Amino acid sequence: MKSYLYYPGCSLKGMGGPYEQSLFSTFRKLDLKLTEIPDWNCCGATAYLSVNGNMAIALAARNLAIAEKDGGRDIVAPCSGCFLSLNKAKASLKEYPELRAKVVDALGRANLQYAGTSKVRHPLEVLMNDVGPEALKKLVTKPLKDLRVVPYYGCAILRPYEVLGDSHTPTVLEELIRITGATPVDYPYKGRCCGGMLTSGVQAVGLRLAEILLEAAKKTEADVIVTTCPLCHYNLECYQDHLRKSTGKDLDIPVMYFTQMLGLAMGLGEREVGVDRLLRRPMTVGVTA
Amino acid sequence: MSESEKPRIGVYVCDCGLNILGVVDVPAVIQYASTLDNVVVSREYKYMCSDPGQDIIKKDIKDLKLNRVIVASCTPSLHERTFRTTVSTAGLNQFLFHMVNIREAVSWVTTDKKKATEKAKTLIKAGVMRVTLQEALEPKTEPVIPEVLVIGGGIAGIHASLSVASAGAKLHLVEREPSIGGNMARFDKTFPTLDCASCILTPKMTTLRVHPNIKLYSYSEVVGVEGYVGNFEVTIEKKPRYVNEDLCIGCLKCVEACVYKDARFPNAFDLGLAKRKPIYIPFPQAVPMRVLIDPNDCLKIKLGKCKMTCVESCEKDAIDFDMKPERLTVKVGSIIVTTGFKPFDPRRKPQYGYGVYPNVYTALEAERLLSPTGPTEGTPLLQDGTMPKSVGIIHCIGSRDENTNVYCSKVCCMYSLKLAHLVKERTGAEVYNFYIDMRTAGKGYEEFYKKLLEEGVKFVRGRVAELTTAPLSNAERGKLILRVEDTLAGYVRRIPVDMVILSVGLEPQNDAQELRRMLNLSCGKDGFLIELHPKLAPVSTATDGIYIAGACQGPKDIPDTVAQAGAAAAEALALVHKGMVEIEPYAAVTNEDLCSGCQICVGLCPYYAIEYDAEKKVSRVKDVMCKGCGVCVAACPSGAMDQKHFRDAFVTAEVAGVI
Amino acid sequence: MNVSRTVKYEEELDADFANEIAAMPGGEKIWDCIQCGTCSAICPVSVYMDKTPRRIIGMIRAGFKDEVLSSVSPWICTSCYSCTVECPADIKITDIMYSIKRMAMEQKTYRRFVIPDIEDEFVKMVWKNGRLSEAKMGMKVARKSGLRNLISMVPLAWKLSRRNRLKLFHTERMANPEQLRIVLNAMQEHPPELHVKKPGVVPTHHHEAVTT
């Protein structure tokens, strides 16, 4: 039984609740253990780095230091944004020894040490590398036949840390979709930014980005969009009504997490994977709650 | 060293204007030198390498009967040869001379006058102690085989071959494709004159074909090189054409008669854009005009079963399915490498959709589409057979990019302009050129750019970030959309086109590394073969007798390629003319009394210059083959191996002088 | 008709500005920019910026400090890192955008608009609780974006809270936020900006995967 540390980040318990739920239920089924990092703090996302550079790194590093105390298990950060922030802190501390000295000192005051040894990983990569396609295939008992899925990676899981291979031509999400029995569609914007915090800050721009993504998704005649990040999920899912009113376009399409898709294919019920908590229920043909 | 003669050393310290005098206290140094053992005279002069300077040395050798000379001045790589000549003109063996570097090693690396003077003194002392022990040696001369090998039959190889051959020397040209012509044979027109490439190339090709001094080995590769300058032994492997070259007359009846009624297999000359039969010629002007059979496509060779209508049709009985690869050796005095380039593979930049979206071509493929002998007979058509109404040409694909190749490939701006002109002329389409900088340095090149500016081609200064087929408007439907920042106008633009041409950069050939190792050549960071000196020796290499020319040395256009080819030919001809080559006598030499016969040296020698005498149980150096690298000397556990002019005793004396 | 004169004199430019940015993490290669415009072309939001990323880099190098620090461009940047990945000169443009934001915040030269204020609130909330409460943050944002906006978000907020995805009255908080504050306080003893030794000293290629 493989065991990981779990970094939820500020979204997984709230907006990204269905993600956490489906992550837990699928990992349990795959016999992977997740232990939440004790008293973790916010990773800083993009906001903190815009205000104070050094503190932003220290903020994220605190989580890495706590993880090290735990003894070397890999950290699973399901939110792509957190995945990026934590890895960025790790990279910055490796690259800038002056900064590292300051952060190590600051962490030391809270009785924490930092050696830069914890690995921060995304559950999509963990599934494909640690469990592997063969093992996953064996556990698919209710293949999602006839389901057409848009593989939407978003940007943070692809860039700048190319853990899924060349950021221009990623294929793991499509692979996972095929493993579940569904069909990935050809999607031109699989790595294009969803707008991140723009829907909150500069709504006109954020909405336009979401509109482009949704319109292209509708064009593929897919049944559902699958995402890897709660912020992408929010941007794609929560403004479809608003957009219909402002543009007149029908952009209704269910959006779910890849862990939910996998869970359903592995025979978990809709409530177990939190499908009931989505705004639109994906019509996953042939699956019952 | 002759023990009867006591050493009489002359020390000459050069001021080098102010280069040395400005930092080193030269008067103090010559004063010090005169106190050293065996030093008979110690002088200072403004410019030792000048005629009067050299005369001083010559006079002293005569008048003072000097038998050793030291010059303390610049680096030996500049003037060691000069002073060795000076000394030998005065009747003293040139290897009784030693040069001490007090410029690049002293006055040019410090401003501390005291330290510089001390160091100069120390180095001269060391030099004096060394030269005391030096022995007279005679330079070896080796006869030069008056034949030349040229590897690669593109425009560089063709021009070099014709230059060498027309001077009366014999040469062997090895080309791995079935025909010579290289990449230039694929072009439609050449910039800036818009000459038809084949029209200017084929006359040279036919001259070569009939030249009595040139032996052409087509469809052959160099597989082994041994020897050294003046005496190379090269092994060539002739790949089987399955057609006897001496009998075939190139009538092409066999191609017509082949059981495959339609051409089915991608033709390499057309970069896969056109098809050929298993029996074929690469292009209509091929030299030699001889057919060949691809063993992977031919039914008879692959499956053993075929009607063999080709054999039936051949009046000369030239087809031979039992042909095997043939190896032969040639002996030459010098080698010219003209193996050319390969275009950058745009699949390494997936952003541009090559191989994914239709109608995205590389520049070389575009040349084939524009060529009258190409798959579309000169009109660049879309894959559905229609004419494009808009074409985008994207510069700098793979070049000037930290992610692929950092260097600029030099020729792409010019060929992109040429392609723009030709495409517009043949199709009337709207043509866009997307560039970062317009690099048109060359005779007539800026004028060519000016001409293009007036032809209605749309120039957008901006590097295209990606190609997409996802439309954001009706006009974009079904097109290839280029997203680019027009940096001059100051707007991000989306430009839909029907066809995209990628101006790919130039890279070394796939097997450049393999080949250069065979020849003992070095390459730069970018993989291109490296010249001896970037300014003053662009076609020579660190390996005597091997010259490089053309794109294998770095991206360049045809005029520069031809110029380099001529230069390399001249170097090779110099060797042929001189008839002999002087080799520095730094060979290793075995003290057979000390040799234990362990043979460690034999295995280590990179030039296979040591042989083991099983009878006497000693290892002996073949003086002629030894390049003086010193590896055996360092490795010899019993100290039996020593190196002439770099004897252990000399080196320890020099070190003792420093300490 | 109003005409204005826009020549820029050397005295008005800040010659040190480029060096300042180059000395901040990620700015090391700013001098290598060949102004190709790939960054602007790949950026999904460059068409909304008042100055495209390429232009911002050009202006930094020339010393147009005021114009750059008051531009909205860096605030629209979503940190998608496309520019950083595509840049043929390996310039970490995203990091430079962050540097501009931090400088603008510190020197208060940014124009008054929503995003910097939101980010300030973010930092305050993290200081207080160690984590973000989405609902609280959302309300702050909505308030700053105007009443109409706030009202239009209500149906969505309701739907989400019904599905237990928006905890309207819950504050997400660490058990011991004090532990975090110790670390943040310690960092505050240093100047907020890290100045890397010299431009070009730390050229780690960003393609290095961190986890593998």
Image (cartoon, helix red, strand yellow):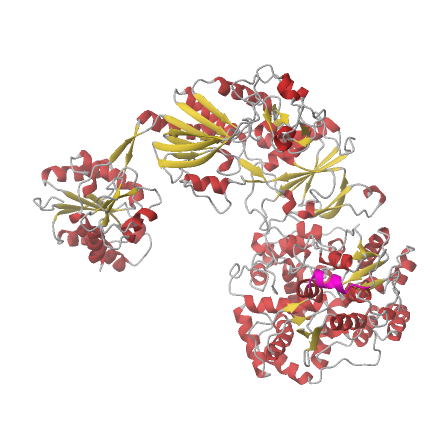
- Residue at the outermost left position: B4
- Residue at the outermost top position: B315
Q: Which residue is more in the foreground, B248 or B540?
A: B248
Q: Quadrant of the N terminus of chain B?
A: top left
Q: Is residue A281 above or below residue B655?
A: below
In the rendered structure, the answer to whether residue C163 lies left or right of residue B49 reads: right
- Residue B507 appears in the figure: yes
In the rendered structure, the answer to whether residue A26 lies left or right of residue A112 reads: right
Residue segment shown in magenta: A132-141
Q: Which residue is more in the foreground, C129 or A219?
A: A219
Q: Tell me which corner region of the image, top left, top right, bottom left or bottom right, holds residue C105.
A: bottom right
- Residue B52 appears in the figure: no
- Dominant SS type (magenta): helix
Residue C108 on the magenta segment: no
In the rendered structure, the answer to whether residue B350 lies left or right of residue B517 reads: right
Residue A135 on the magenta segment: yes
What x and y, as percent, mark residue C106? 65, 70
Count of labels shown?
A: 0
What x and y, as percent, mark residue B583? 28, 36
Q: Quadrant of the C terminus of chain B?
A: bottom left
Q: Is residue C152 above or below residue B69?
A: below
Q: Which residue is more in the foreground, A96 or B266?
A: B266
Q: Which residue is more in the foreground, C93 or C84?
A: C84
What x and y, as percent, mark residue B366? 67, 33
Name the residue rendered at 85%, 43% in the picture.
B474
Name the residue rendered at 87%, 64% in the picture.
A287
Q: Tell me which corner region of the image, top left, top right, bottom left or bottom right, holds residue C96.
A: bottom right
Q: Tell me which corner region of the image, top left, top right, bottom left or bottom right, holds residue B626.
A: top left
What x and y, as percent, mark residue B515? 47, 39
